[in-house]
Amino acid sequence: AQSVTQLDSQVPVFEEAPVELRCNYSSSVSVYLFWYVQYPNQGLQLLLKYLSGSTLVKGINGFEAEFNKSQTSFHLRKPSVHISDTAEYFCAVSSQRDDKIIFGKGTRLHILP
Amino acid sequence: GAGVSQTPSNKVTEKGKYVELRCDPISGHTALYWYRQSLGQGPEFLIYFQGTGAADDSGLPNDRFFAVRPEGSVSTLKIQRTERGDSAVYLCASSPGRANTGELFFGEGSRLTVL
């Protein structure tokens, strides 16, 4: 079975500063990895995904994530955040064998002016 | 709008009552997922359908919970003998193909409150 750990429940960061949201996963088989974002009063939407190939994945709104198999991590980064990035970010994992997608508990990104 | 539609958006019920939550996926999407999200938590997997059949129902917490998708489109999540612990936002998502290589499109959820 797969599982996802997001250690930080909240991350405060100043506007225009860089940010990293951490995600670690556990699985006995090969995985696909995702980041979803939930803006206030909206449904979840896909930010980016890693399926195979290059370990650095670029997504929407300037976000990117790096898959590190040895550390079983898939951290999300942005070099300069904006107030509009205020949202909750969820890391998710799926095995390559089936379509069950497991989400982490989420990290709330709080942008400070 | 052709997004995932969930009804009702809010449901308040009394302990012990029966509840149905409906999900209309995006037209043509073959995969449909149900998740439950409690306050401060991430979406908790309940069940997913590929077409009419439940491909994985391992997340349903107990036999009070049941979901159907009889024609491969609309799905209903049914909760019998509701308990206060069932209070949460129930999320539905759909995908045009295999969600694990594609993308889940989420509805805005049905908020269930059990008094």
Image (cartoon, coloured by chain):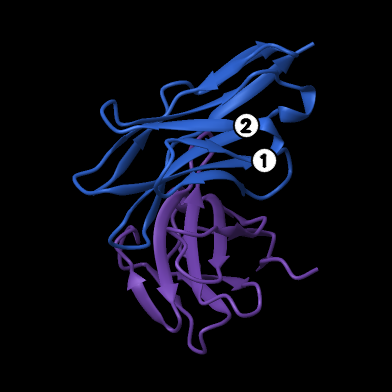
Q: Quadrant of residue A25?
A: top left
> Measured from the top left, where is residue A66 in percent x and y?
45, 30
Q: Quadrant of residue B94?
A: bottom right
Residue that extends furthest to the front in the rendered view of this protein: A54
Residue type at numbered disc 2: Phe
User: On the image, numbered disc 1 is attached to which residue?
Assistant: A60
Q: Quadrant of the N terminus of chain B?
A: bottom right
Give yes or no for contact between labels 2 and 1 (Cβ–Cβ under 8 Å).
yes
The answer to which of A37 and A108 lies nearer the viewer is A37
Q: Which residue is drawn at the image coordinates 57% and 34% (left, top)?
A: A89
The answer to which of B83 and A6 lies nearer the viewer is A6
> Measured from the top left, where is residue B68 in percent x and y?
45, 79
> Measured from the top left, where is residue A49 in percent x and y?
50, 46
Q: State the blue chain.
A: A
Q: Are marks 2 and 1 on the same chain?
A: yes
User: On the image, numbered disc 2 is attached to which residue?
Assistant: A63
Q: State the purple chain.
A: B
Q: Is residue B58 left or right of residue A22?
A: left
Q: Is residue B114 visible?
A: no
Residue type at numbered disc 1: Ile
